[in-house]
Amino acid sequence: MKFNTFIQRLAAAVVLTLVVPSIGLASEMKTQKKWEFAVDSAAEFEPMAAEIRQEMEAGKYSHLAERDRLAVDTDLNRVNRLLTKRDELSKLSQRDQVELVNAQERINAILIDNDAGRIICKLEAKVGTRMKTKQCLTVREWAMVDAAAERTKMDMHMGGGKLPQEGQ
């Protein structure tokens, strides 16, 4: 039983070693590129959404594929719905704020063709608690976190969960 606990701690240490530097990178990137929503109400947002839709029809975004236009339109509607839900942006629930950020980032990613740099926020429970915190990383950074976890899982699987014996 002690051996399994040791392996679990070793795996956690490996994951932390691989993940913590990428989270530090995410912090640096977030200070460089902060997402800020410039409007406080649906009334302020509607003219912006109308302009984007017009540009998709016959403007700088007219090159978009039909599926991308539908995705942008869906997310514009989502942002509008979220903004009309409360009087002020700051009164949105944490879940709605996450949804709002993700919708805005999807719109930006499609319009500027930069999906790897798009920020995705997730509500995640910290180990040992039920309290959820918001963690925002780029698509690229989430992929790095997932890859590090997968590598650790594969290493554990390939090694059979056993440490190499001395002399081997």
Image (cartoon, helix red, strand yellow):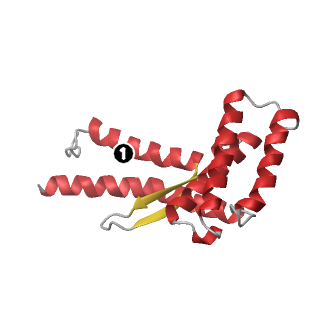
Q: Nearer the viewer, residue 2 or 99?
A: 99
Residue 118 in view in this figure: no
Give the residue number, with chain letter if any, for mark 1.
152
Q: Write the residue at 52% across / 66% down.
A: 93
Report the residue at 59% width, 58% height from top.
26
Coordinates of residue 6 in the picture (x, y in percent): 22, 57
> Picture coordinates of residue 86 (x, y %)?
60, 66
Can you name the residue that lies furthest to the top here? 66
Residue displayed at 58% across by 45% down: 140
**Residue in view at x 71 percent, y 67 percent:** 40
Residue 18 image point, x, y percent: 46, 53
Label tally = 1
**Horizontal side, residue 57 vs residue 27: left or right:** right
Q: Which amino acid type corresponds to the residue marked 1 in the rendered image?
A: Thr
Q: Quadrant of residue 85?
A: bottom right
Q: Is residue 64 left or right of residue 102?
A: right
